[in-house]
Image (tube, coloured by chain):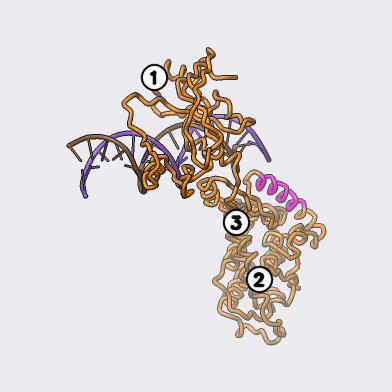
Chain colours: A orange, B purple, C brown
Amino acid sequence: MLHGSMRAFVLEEEENKAGLEVASSTMMKVEENMSNPTTSASSQNPVPAKRKRGLPGNPDPDAEVIALSPNTLMATNRFVCEICNKGFQRDQNLQLHRRGHNLPWKLKQRTNKQVRKKVYICPDASCVHHDPSRALGDLSGIKKHFSRKHGEKKWKCEKCSKKYAVHSDWRAHCKICGTREYRCDCGTLFSRRDSFITHRAFCDALAEESARVTQANPVADHHQHLYSQPLSSHELAAGQSTTMQPQFPDGLRSQHADIRRSHGTYVTMKQEISSPWAACQGPEPQPAASTSQSQMDPLSSIYATMLESEFQREGQSSLPASYRTSTTFPFLSATALFQKEAQMGAVTARPRHIDQMAAHTSSATGFSLGWCSGGAPLHGVKTHSALLHEMACPPPPPADIAGFSEGKPQ
DNA sequence: GACTAGAAGGGGCTAAGGTT
DNA sequence: AACCTTAGCCCCTTCTAGTC
């Protein structure tokens, strides 16, 4: 489809004779009656508050159409002296230079007549912008277009290996390349948010399924498969043995926490609980005999005292033996804490929300519900949960914690 | 020589349209 | 829906012709 009242068609010579670009031009007339939607619309409507650009490739119908050769579009010093082969960006520069060679020269004269708007067509015949009706409105535009579509892409992004022909495009890409990165818990990386969301839906469903399986078979855990490492806090909370010592690499552990933070989910617990893990990778467990109350660290001691008094208040003679022998409450893993609470609940009264917590193992919100449930727990249980909460959020523990890995409570 | 105006080059920003 | 590419617009700088 040709453009309507296109008046003139200036064709630049494709060939440069003797290295000198000759600006001879041919005038052509293209006569068809076709209205330009852009201009007709703009003439009918009042000027909008925010200026809108015209559609691509719909130049002013009265504009002068200029066809530059590929050489011209790509050349930097396209005006070349036939004597010394020196190139110049502009004809005026060349003409001035020719004076030095005592060659005839002619500077472009300023003209008083009104300059008609120029539009430029792409020299590539197969290109949509080769059609005068789709000519581009400015010279830099057609140059950029020709470079992008038909030129050599010599600018390469170091990060993603994408190539660009226009330097500014390359720079714009380099600014944002690698800044949008989405990482799932399972370690998979995504550059696109939608892909990441899709994957996460799958990954979460898998985690929930694993949690259900975990209740029946504590070994099953998709993160174990994915990381080849145990475990995350919510999985521990599902009731796995404390003899399993999670060994997240520090980097992965903090990364995991960061990811959850970005999801707005169970970040805090994850980070808090990770500290005891680090501690539990410490020295060999001490013999039970060596872990007397006097050797406890202050927090352990305080907690043991609190628990004992709690039991006594509830009518129990004293803390069960298994609790008294354990000296490491503040630095137990989440599993150990839950198990202890569950045991205590079995001794006193088993709270429903503990079961709920276990059932929510893969759900971030479910996990936090376990800690922050607004429901009315049974008498005594609230105290235990509060104590456990305090235990789960201790200051960083000392490096060697005696007796941590003694295993699960009797 | 100083100053001004115009042309050209290049880069940044962003709307529009296409793609995934 | 989000992302990517393309093209239009604008601004700044540089260079040169013309004028005083």
Q: Which numbered disc, 3 or 2, marks the residue that appears first in the sequence?
A: 3
- Is residue A123 in sight in this rendering? yes
Counting from the top left corner in percent of width and height, residue B4 is at 24, 38
Residue that badge 3 annotates: A158
Given the image, on which type of amino acid does mark 1 rest?
Answer: Pro
Horizontal arrangement in the rendering, residue C15 relative to residue A173 (left or right): left
Q: Nearer the viewer, residue A29 or A129?
A: A29
Kindly indicate whether the residues beneath marks 3 and 2 are on one polypeptide chain.
yes
Asked if residue A56 shows in the view, the reply is no
- Say what amino acid the circle numbered 3 marks: Glu
Task: Judge whether A393 appears above or below A261 on screen.
Answer: below
Span shown in magenta: A195-209
Residue visible at 42% across and 41% down in the picture: A90
A159 w.r.t. A197: above or below: below
Looking at this rendering, what residue extends furthest in the top direction? A33
- What residue is pinned by disc 1? A46
Q: Secondary structure at mark 3?
A: loop
A203 part of magenta stretch: yes
B16 relative to A357 in the view: left or right:
left
Q: Which residue is mark 2?
A: A277
Marks 1 and 2, the one that precedes in the sequence: 1
